[in-house]
Amino acid sequence: MTTSRRAFLGWTAGLAASALVAACGGGTSGTTTAGSQPRDGGTLIVGQYQEVTQFDPNRQYSWETWRIDRNIYETLVDEDLTSPTGVPKIIPKLATSWEVSDDATTYTFKLRQGVKFSDGTPFDAEAVRFNVRRFTDPEFEYYDKVSAATMSLVYADLAKFEVVDAFTVRYTFEHPFLDFLRQIPNSGNAASGIFSPEALKKNGQDGLALDPVGTGPFTFQERVRGDHTTLVRNPDYWGPRPHLDKVIFKPIGDDQSRVAALRSGEVDFISRVPPDSVQTLEQAGFDVPKNEGVPQIIYYKYNFKNTYLQDRRVRQAIIHAIDRAQLAEKIYKGHAKAATSIINQGNEAYDPAAVDYPYDPEAAKKLIAEAGYEPGEIKFTILSDTTGQPTAEFIQQGLKNVGVDAQIESFEWITFGTRAANLTPTDGLILGEWGYVAPNWVQIAHNYNVAVPGGDKYSDTSGDTLKAIEAAAHNSDPAKAKDLWQEAAQTWAKDATVIPVLSFNRYYAVSPRVGGFVWPQQDHYDLSRVWVAD
Amino acid sequence: MARRILWRLTGLVPMLFIISLLVFFISKAGPADPVKGALSQKMSPEQIEQIRQAYGLDRPAWQQYAGWLGDMVTDGGGISLSVRSPVSELVYPAFRNTLILGAAATLLTVVLGVAIGFASGLRHGRPTDRIAMLFVQIGSNLPIYWFGLIIIWLTAVRWQWLPAGGMHDLRGEGGFGDLLLHLIAPAFAASLVSMLIIARFVRAAVIESEQSDYIRTYRSQGFGRAAIVGRHIGRNVLPPIVNTTGLTVGSVITGVVFVETIFSWPGIGSVLLNAIAGSDYPVIQSGILLVAVTFVLVNLVTDIALDLLNPRLRHGGA
């Protein structure tokens, strides 16, 4: 109750504040510009929308955390993030070249020579082995269960890891794994950033999170919890010199405070721009880039402990009841795009024509009646984070129109995470935010949102879905991959066990002081080519 | 008098013991699971059980309590379950920041509250009083969250007088002046409601005291207004001021937790919220214990101050 009241206050305050500022004549506009010429030196301050988790690549979770971590830790391969459009090309990073077997089960990497971790120890095949054994080998002295649980998202099918020579390593998977290269530099959970084995030995399993050591263009200086994290340029970096000398990441959880910090010049750049602020920020001279290819999706999952939602007809009716196009257009003012399939925009297998169930309130009412429920009989709770409150309210209204009575509970993100991990039978829909470039996202999403929570029991078609997903996951022919994943997603969609909602096409806002920032088709960005004006 | 103070201090010991018991067992009574919360949903039941053992969460509650109390005394509260660093490093710096903000807010509450109260009380019924009371009326109904945002938009974005949030300028060298500059807006936002409560109390006390018989007597004997206000009215309204201040420190601290979110102030509020969400017992327990102890100490100081102000007690009475 208090949380929704707070969220309500937040929205009214945001509106009032916007109105106030509009009345004051649009506020200040930036006078400095970064110019067209890159400049070396200077400090960039990033305003993040949540507090980050921890700087251990194998234990971290959340996009904002990886946006910091990837400057400290590097991966064997990376993606070329210099273009704002198109699926990023896989490029060499700590590996200079690689070979993939024809059946896509064996990956052999030639490692870059002469690279040192920022603690001075060498990067080589043994260092990679140490990293991989940490999360795959229970016999290993430095095996870590927490890392193993997280990293299994990518490495569950790893059959064998070999050191071929001092600078060559080989991964062998039990099944073909076409998306392995794409998953190596991925964002959020299960990050394959390579850490210094000596640092882990010295500081212990929990120490890496506090004192992260990698090979990246920046090194960790300090983290003041709740306040900021500072990275400084790595003077011994093997690659091109990054322009910036220092990057400071500051969590500012409140939407309006974050926008205010950007406008007053305290931060140079923010993530998760509230839709109401896009226009005023642009008018004030800030760049709010548009990108319709970012692999991110807002969706809702069902709580299968709720008896109403164990009936496929009710789940299908709920999807019919939500006018996603209207949500993107009206509530998000066109700064978002409706999602009608679990395969997110920006995914290699994305198909904009795929629709699970169209908006059709009459069909929804009929299905609910068929399931044997009177209007007003079905009741449950929608769980959301505070930034997702407007979406939740829109869904609540749509459900009300078809005779479903939903209450909203919204929390700060970390609180939300715990609440979502401890569901009660009266909970109904739970917010999800995820998405990948790699199409094996379909498998990850199905595992996480349906198979593990027990949703397969309540679906007539789950056998077909599992078969279709396995066919796609174990396929070794890149030419067939897209079709197989689309088929898997469409088979799954018939179960109505997940509700795709929308994707954002505005997300960052950048001060005119900043040059070289690109919002690529990824959930993170590359800071090594960014510069700031004097 | 000294005996009375000593007696109050002795009373603290059982009180703190009871608080520590309450804090420990109430925080354990929540439904959420710390291991699940900390590790998201990707672990098998066996893995979760192993981790629970590693943290000692399988031991009987009294053993866990004894262990925690030992940790509190020796190293300040043990290790956080969710972020795995010492609780002392998480909780103490954040609590210090909250105290700084809370102290500044309390100071503003008292100084401005008393000033407004006296100004309207002494001009009772005249335009100054009417206008002040109108502001008090409006101000005490403003939601802190809304009010804080308006302050930020005006002072930081529109006029650019003050920073938009945080404790220090991340580009600069910091220092005391920088801290003061960052304190003004959040301290004002956090103090608003309590300030206006004190203003009302003081105004009422001033009016009452000014209309009392003995003040009328003083006046009739030709004492100057300044002397009457300074020596007599002031002395009479002091106890209610101290009393109300002691009571409102509680709401200042509650307000501070909201204000910390809006002004990105790295205080105990967000640490506790996150810890409660993640069922991070060691952090919740240490954090709440610190807040509880602060309340107890503020009450103690208020009581002692009231005793000192009470002539009957000061002159040796029971």
Image (tube, coloured by chain):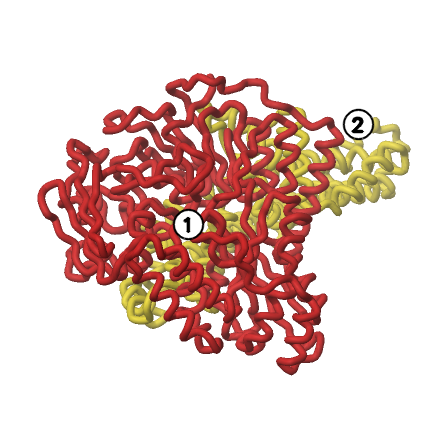
Q: Nearer the viewer, residue A273 or B191?
A: A273
Q: Does residue B268 appear to the left or right of A25 in the view shown? A: left
* Residue occupied by mark 2: B226
Residue B279 visible at all: no
Q: CA distance from mark 2 to mark 1?
A: 81 Å
Kindly identify the residue that appears in the image at 27 percent across and 46 percent down.
Answer: A207
Foreground tag (2 vs 1): 1
Residue A491's disc number: none
Residue A489 at what x, y percent from top left?
A: 45, 62
Q: Nearer the viewer, residue B254 or A386?
A: A386
* Chain at numbered mark 1: A
| Colour for chain A in the figure | red
Kindly identify the residue that appears in the image at 65 percent across and 82 percent down.
Answer: A372
SS class of the residue under badge 1?
A: loop
Q: Is the Cβ of the residue at disc 2 closer than 8 Å to that at disc 1? A: no
Q: Is A189 rendered above or below residue B103? A: below
Residue B129 at what x, y percent from top left?
A: 85, 36
The image quadrant that residue A260 belongs to is top right
Residue B228 at what x, y percent from top left?
A: 80, 32
| Chain letter for the yellow colouring in the rendering | B
Q: Residue furthest left?
A: A165
Q: Is B194 rendered above or below residue A373? A: above
Check disc 2 and give the amino acid type.
Ala
Residue A348's disc number: 1
Kindly identify the residue that appears in the image at 49 percent across and 60 percent down.
Answer: B15
Q: Residue furthest bottom?
A: A372
